[in-house]
Image (spheres, rainbow, N blue to C red):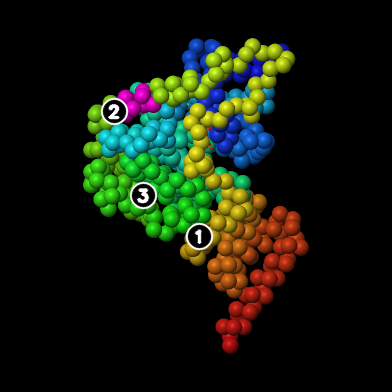
């Protein structure tokens, strides 16, 4: 009989560390090398089956991790299939995540900068390797008991050469930490990751999320695209040195061009604020947080309750749906946004006529590359936005509909394509007549 607690005959599951959008992460013992590791298993989440998007994210994360070799980025050790379930094995970050650390209140500038520098260095290494993280947020920043910062969860990473991700059902990022240009539909660049770093620094220095604790996507999108993040340098937080506040404000700038251009530049700018004292204070803080969490867990676990699975037996099933939630209660604000039809409408409705044109160019490139299904879905969103914001006679609307019809025709949806072509023709003729008069 197979032992459900032993993966691939080598990794013994010790305890669940938490559940993410794609599956469950466990602490496990590598019985060959006799060391503790973290094992991430793709699995059905919340009753849903592991769909294409989950599998794509899972593979993307493994590929991204394999490309980056840096102490600030979680190391990939192994990957494989257990039965038909993909899994990968990585370095165990033995400590706490940044969200947990800030639960007790704002961090001192020295500690915040030690964490910020760790994240900036990890991003510089990732960008150098051609990987954009795309979901920099406190729950993805691990800090070991020694105070080393380790960035993980590259499930949304974008690898150099990949096209933008715009299909329905695809996870986009976490609204509170998403750069305004990404919310508006632009392809993310390195400066979008730096915006996430800026929001993390803002969060550490103030103890609060810049747009408040609400997770309501519409309100967050409105604030991010409206007034933007309230500057730290307005003097509301007098404990933050002015030059540091100005740097955080630059990282959180609404316009990407106002942010530092590269992660390497962000490292240079942060270095003067991060000293040995901050690093030592960070290690102490993590050690205290780990102790507190252990005490809390001991109080919550009834005597005699085991965390490790019992020996395998016919009556025992390693049921990950029955797992307790993550060690750290997952707060809605840290949950990434999946592009459902509704959120797509919401996010894309903030598209300006200018970026509608650039999105359309991206879609046409997809058509020319033969990626028709993706192009058709993207053009359908662009068309909806153009129709409502620019009107049915606008050249951008007509061009989007034309290319959508081309896709539909090539995908075999002849009648729909014909209908769309004739609608485009009608409106084009109408425009011609109007300009003749
Ligand atoms: N290498 C690791 N070492 C220790 N804990 C880890 C490691 N990787 C992930 N975790 C923990 O496992 C849990 C699930 O992580 P995962 O990356 O799957 O999802 P998430 O970041 O929580 O959520 P989402 O993917 O929805 O953003 C989190 O609590 C995370 O802190």
Q: Quadrant of the C terminus?
A: bottom right
Question: Which of the labelled discs sits on residue 424, or is there none?
Answer: none
Q: Main secondary structure of the magenta part?
A: helix
> Residue beneath label 2, please?
281
Task: Name the foreground residue: 323 vs 39.
Answer: 323
The residue depicted at 58 percent of the width and 49 percent of the height is 339
On whether ligand 1 comes within 8 Å of the CB at mark 3, the answer is no
What whole-number distance in Å separates the C-alpha atoms at marks 2 and 3? Answer: 25 Å
Give the residues in magenta: 282-290
Residue 127, given in percent of the width and then of the height, sits at 41, 39
Q: Which residue is mark 3?
A: 252
In this view, which residue lies farthest toward the bottom? Answer: 437
Q: Is residue 433 above or below residue 274?
A: below
Between circles 2 and 3, the one closer to the viewer is 2
**Residue 1 picture location, percent across and down:** 71, 13
Q: What residue does disc 1 label?
A: 350
Disc 1 on helix, strand or loop? loop
Q: Determine whether, in the image, residue 215 is placed left or right of residue 115.
A: right
Residue at (56, 30) in percent of width and height: 325
Give the mark, 3 or 1, whose residue is nearer the N terminus: 3
* Residue 63 in magenta stretch: no
Q: Residues within 10 Å of mark 2 (few under 14, many from 20)?
A: some
Q: Is residue 288 magenta?
A: yes
Reading the chain from its start, which is encountered first: label 2 or label 3?
3
Residue 89, visible in the rendered structure = no
Q: Nearer the viewer, residue 141 or 235?
A: 235
* Above or below, comparing residue 189 to residue 326 in the picture: below
Coordinates of residue 140 in the picture (x, y in percent): 45, 35
């Amino acid at each position: 009989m197979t032992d459900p607690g032993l993966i691939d005959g080598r990794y013994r599951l010790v305890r669940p560390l938490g559940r993410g959008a794609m599956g469950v992460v466990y602490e496990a013992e590598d019985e060959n090398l006799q060391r503790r590791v973290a094992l991430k298993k793709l699995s059905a989440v919340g009753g849903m089956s592991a769909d294409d998007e989950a599998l794509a994210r899972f593979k993307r994360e493994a590929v991204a991790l394999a490309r980056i070799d840096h102490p600030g980025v979680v190391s990939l050790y192994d990957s494989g299939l257990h039965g038909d379930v993909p899994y990968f094995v990585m370095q165990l970050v033995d400590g706490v995540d940044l969200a947990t650390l800030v639960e007790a209140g704002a961090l001192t500038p020295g500690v915040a900068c030690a964490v910020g520098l760790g994240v900036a260095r990890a991003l510089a290494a990732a960008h150098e390797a051609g990987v954009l993280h795309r979901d920099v947020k406190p729950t993805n920043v691990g800090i070991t008991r020694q105070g080393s910062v380790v960035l993980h969860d590259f499930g949304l990473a974008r690898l150099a050469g990949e096209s933008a991700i715009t299909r329905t059902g695809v996870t986009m990022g976490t609204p509170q930490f998403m750069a305004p240009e990404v919310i508006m539909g632009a392809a993310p660049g390195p400066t979008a990751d730096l915006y996430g770093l800026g929001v993390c620094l803002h969060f550490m220095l103030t103890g609060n999320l810049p747009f408040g604790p609400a997770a309501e996507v519409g309100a967050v999108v409105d604030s991010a695209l409206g007034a933007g993040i309230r500057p730290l340098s307005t003097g509301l937080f007098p404990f933050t040195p002015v030059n540091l506040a100005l740097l955080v404000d630059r990282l959180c700038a609404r316009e990407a061009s106002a942010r530092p251009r590269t992660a390497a530049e962000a490292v240079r700018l942060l270095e003067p604020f991060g000293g040995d004292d901050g690093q030592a204070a960070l290690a102490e803080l993590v050690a205290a947080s780990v102790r507190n969490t252990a005490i809390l867990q001991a109080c919550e676990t009834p005597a005699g309750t085991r965390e490790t699975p019992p020996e395998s037996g016919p009556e025992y099933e390693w049921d990950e749906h029955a797992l307790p939630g993550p060690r750290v209660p997952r707060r809605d604000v840290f949950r990434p946004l999946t592009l459902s039809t509704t959120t797509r409408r919401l996010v894309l409705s903030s598209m300006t006529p200018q970026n509608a044109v650039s999105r359309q160019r991206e879609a046409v490139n997809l058509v020319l590359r033969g990626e028709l299904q993706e192009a058709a879905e993207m053009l359908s969103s662009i068309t909806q936005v153009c129709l409502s914001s620019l009107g049915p006679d606008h050249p951008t609307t007509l061009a989007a509909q034309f290319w959508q019809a081309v896709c539909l025709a090539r995908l075999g949806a002849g009648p729909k394509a014909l209908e769309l072509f004739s609608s485009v023709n009608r409106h084009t003729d109408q425009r011609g007549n109007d300009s003749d008069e």
